Image (cartoon, helix red, strand yellow):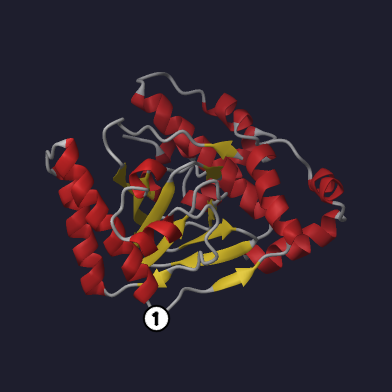
Amino acid sequence: MKYEDIHLELNVGGKFWLFEKIDHTMIEGHVHRELEVNIILSGQADYIVKGQKISLEKKSLIWLFPNQKHLLINITDDFSMIIGVFKSDFLKKLIDKDAKKNLLELDYQDNVPGIITSKQLNSIIFNYEELTEANYGPDYFNTYLSHVCLKLWYLFLDTKNRSVFNELPEVIERCLYLLEDEFNSMTLESIGQDLGYSASQVSRLFKKHIGTSIVEYRQKKRLDYFVSQVQSIRNKNKKINMTNLAFESGFGSYAQFHRIFKSAFGCGPNEYFKT
C-alpha cells in the first residue's frame, strides 16, 4: 500500500482535478493525509474501503478520510470522476463548526456514497471549472474552496439514495492488497498459503465477492500495467520492446501475453498502438 504524497501549493487549502480511466490505466491502492471527495461523472467502479466493497456509478458522491486506505477496482473504460482534496489545516479554519468536526475525523463512520441529482451534478461541475480554470489569487481561491467543500458535505448528508455496498471478508480484502503489491510474482498457491487458506478456497471467495477470478483480475492488472508503460514510453519518444515489456508486466511468455491482449482488445498490441 503506497502512502501518496499529494503535491499542494503552500498557500492554498486543497485542489480539484479530473480523473479519467482512459488516462490512468494503472490504478493502485493508496492512503494519504488529506481529506478526499469524489464525484462520479460517468461509468462504474468499486471502492474497497474498511472491509467493504462500495459500488460507484454516475452521480455518486463519496468522502474518503485521512489515512483511510482505499483501492479502486472493476473500473469501466468510460469511468471518470472529479477528485477534490483538502488539507487538515484548511479544514480547521472552516466557519461551520459541525461540518468542521466531522470533516476532521480520521475515520468517519459512513463511507457509503450518496446519489445526487443531475442538477446538483451540473452545479458541482460548474464549481469545479471555476476552481480549475479561473486565475484566482490564494485568498479568494481558499474562500471559494471553503464554499465548495461545505456545499459537497451537506449534499452528501442530504442524499436519501445511497449506493450499494457489501461487507467484504477480511481474507478477500487482504488478498486484494496482496495482489496490489505482488501481482507480478505470486502463484495462487502462495497467495492461499500467505492468507492461511487453500488456493481453491481463496479463488472461490474472490470470485463470489469481487465478481471475477483471481486469474482474470491479475491478467487485467498486468494488461493495465503494460498499456500504461507503453503510453509512458511513447510520451518520451523512446523505442518500445513489446517482448521485454510483456515479461516485465508479469506474463510468462510473449505468446501468453499476445493471446490475452488480443482477447481483451480485439487485436494484437502492434495493431492496437498504431498511431
Query: Along the horizontal axis of the image, is 64 left or right of 197?
Result: left
Q: Position of residue 46 (x, y in %)?
A: 52, 61
Residue 188 as seen in the image, left or right of residue 248 = right
Considering the image in quadrants, where does the C terminus appear? top left
Looking at numbered disc 1 in the image, what kind of residue is underneath it? Lys
Residue appearing at x 52%, y 36% in the figure: 226
Judge the density around disc 1: few (<14), some (14-19), many (≥20) Cα neighbours within 10 Å.
Answer: few
Q: In this figure, what is the number of numbered marks? A: 1
- Can residue 206 be seen in this snapshot? yes
Residue appearing at x 64%, y 37% in the figure: 255
Classify 78 as above or below 18.
below
Residue 52 vs residue 240: left or right?
A: right
The residue that label 1 is drawn on is: 160
For the N terminus, the image quarter is top right
Quarter residue 97 falls in? bottom left
Q: Nearer the viewer, residue 267 or 177?
A: 177
Q: Compared to 241, does 195 lie above or below?
A: below
Of 2 and 180, nearer the camera is: 2
